[in-house]
């Protein structure tokens, strides 16, 4: 492009300098409908260049008019996208500040112009969930569902389960959670949500079944998991004892790992409930084991 421009400028210079060097500018004569127009050659070249420049300007203006819709559309799109990014940043600060309601409004406001509409709606839904605004959260999820792509469905389902648990829609949440567990059995957030759901449903055996995997991938600290484990086992023992079927309770107990069978806390709880159910023989066996272990620890 630069070479072409240089050659063009050299040619133009030649038109001017050639006649000047020869001390003869030459002349250009035009005859149009019996009208005779004459001028110096240099004047003709200047007028020609001016005419070409005017034609170029008209060409550019004509193209701008034709492409104005696309041009202004792109400009507005760029401007809106930048504004949406700023709104998302502000919303994230609001989340960190704990201002969930304002954060949700900003996420929702950014959705139309954001590069990922689904993400904005999901973030708005999560902010509403954290603020216990469940109707608004559901509305945001409905909007997110309309734009959700295949690679976004996993996150969509996580937010959906959180809302279902908050709404105590346990049956729907369980259906989604079990599908997620099959698809992502080692995902920490899926396991956390499953643990929360099963505990709220009173399905303590399901909580117990999740614990080995939760320990492996460290969904919580070991001390927290130990607390959850103790709560789940004690709740399960109580649950089985309420059914007033001592044989079912004894059978379940004997199926537990040795670490559970040798745990003093669980043995004491089991012995207590077995006595309440009239299973004194089994209760005495456990109490004898408790006494033996305690004596060993003293020595």
Image (cartoon, grey):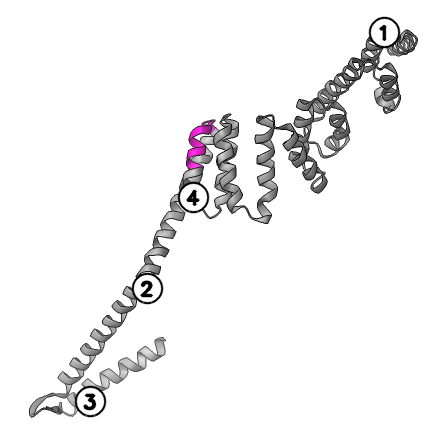
The residue where tag 4 is placed is: 85
Q: Position of residue 261 (x, y in %)?
A: 86, 19
N-term-proximal mark, 3 vs 1: 3
Which secondary structure, mark 4?
A: helix
Closer to the chain start, of discs 4 and 2, is 2
Taking 274 as reference, is 77 left or right?
Answer: left
- Magenta-drawn stretch contains 232: no
Earlier residue among tags 4 and 3: 3
Q: Main secondary structure of the magenta part?
A: helix
Q: Which mark is residue 67?
A: 2
Q: Is residue 84 left or right of residue 289?
A: left
Magenta-highlighted residues: 97-107
Tell me the residue at 84%/13% (across/down). 267
| Residue 255 image offset from top left, x and y in percent | 87, 24
Q: Residue at x 27, y 80 (%)?
A: 9
Estimate the spatial distance between the alpha carbons at disc 1 and disc 2, rounded to whole Å: 88 Å
Residue 275's disc number: 1
Mark 3, residue position: 18
Task: Say which of marks 3 and 2 sits in front.
Answer: 2
Element marked by disc 3: helix
Q: Is residue 51 above or below residue 125?
A: below
Between 101 and 292, the one nearer to me in the picture: 101
* Number of the front mark, 1 or 4: 1
In the rendered view, tell whether residue 210 sits above or below residue 23.
above
Per the rendering, the mark at residue 209 is none
Residues 121 and 277: in front is 277
Crowding at mark 2 (Cα within 10 Å: few <14, some 14-19, many 20+): few
């Amino acid at each position: 492009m630069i070479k072409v421009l240089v050659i063009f400028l050299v040619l133009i210079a030649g038109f001017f300098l050639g006649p000047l060097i020869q001390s003869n500018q030459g002349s250009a004569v035009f005859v149009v409908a019996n009208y005779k127009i004459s001028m110096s050659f240099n004047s003709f070249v200047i007028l020609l260049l001016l005419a070409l420049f005017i034609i170029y300007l008209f060409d550019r203006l004509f193209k701008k008019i034709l492409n104005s819709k696309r041009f202004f559309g792109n400009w507005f799109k760029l401007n809106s996208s930048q504004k949406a990014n700023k709104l998302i940043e502000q919303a994230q600060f609001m989340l960190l500040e704990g201002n969930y309601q304002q954060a949700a409004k900003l996420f929702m406001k950014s959705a139309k112009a954001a590069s990922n509409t689904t993400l904005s709606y999901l973030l708005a839904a999560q902010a509403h969930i954290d603020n216990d605004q469940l109707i608004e959260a559901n509305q945001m999820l409905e909007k997110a569902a309309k734009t959700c792509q295949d690679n976004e469905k996993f996150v969509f389902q996580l937010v959906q389960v959180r809302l279902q648990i908050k709404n105590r829609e346990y049956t729907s949440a369980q259906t989604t959670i079990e599908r997620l567990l099959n698809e992502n059995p080692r995902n920490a957030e899926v396991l956390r949500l499953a643990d929360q759901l099963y505990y709220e449903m009173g399905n303590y055996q399901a909580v117990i079944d999740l614990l080995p995997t939760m320990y492996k991938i460290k969904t919580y600290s070991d001390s927290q998991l130990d607390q959850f484990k103790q709560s789940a086992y004690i709740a399960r023992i109580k649950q089985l004892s309420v059914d007033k079927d001592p044989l079912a309770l004894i059978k379940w107990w004997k199926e537990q790992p040795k670490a559970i069978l040798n745990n003093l806390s669980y043995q004491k709880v089991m012995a207590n409930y077995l006595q309440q159910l009239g299973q004194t023989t089994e209760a005495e066996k456990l109490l004898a084991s408790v006494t033996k272990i305690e004596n060993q620890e003293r020595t």
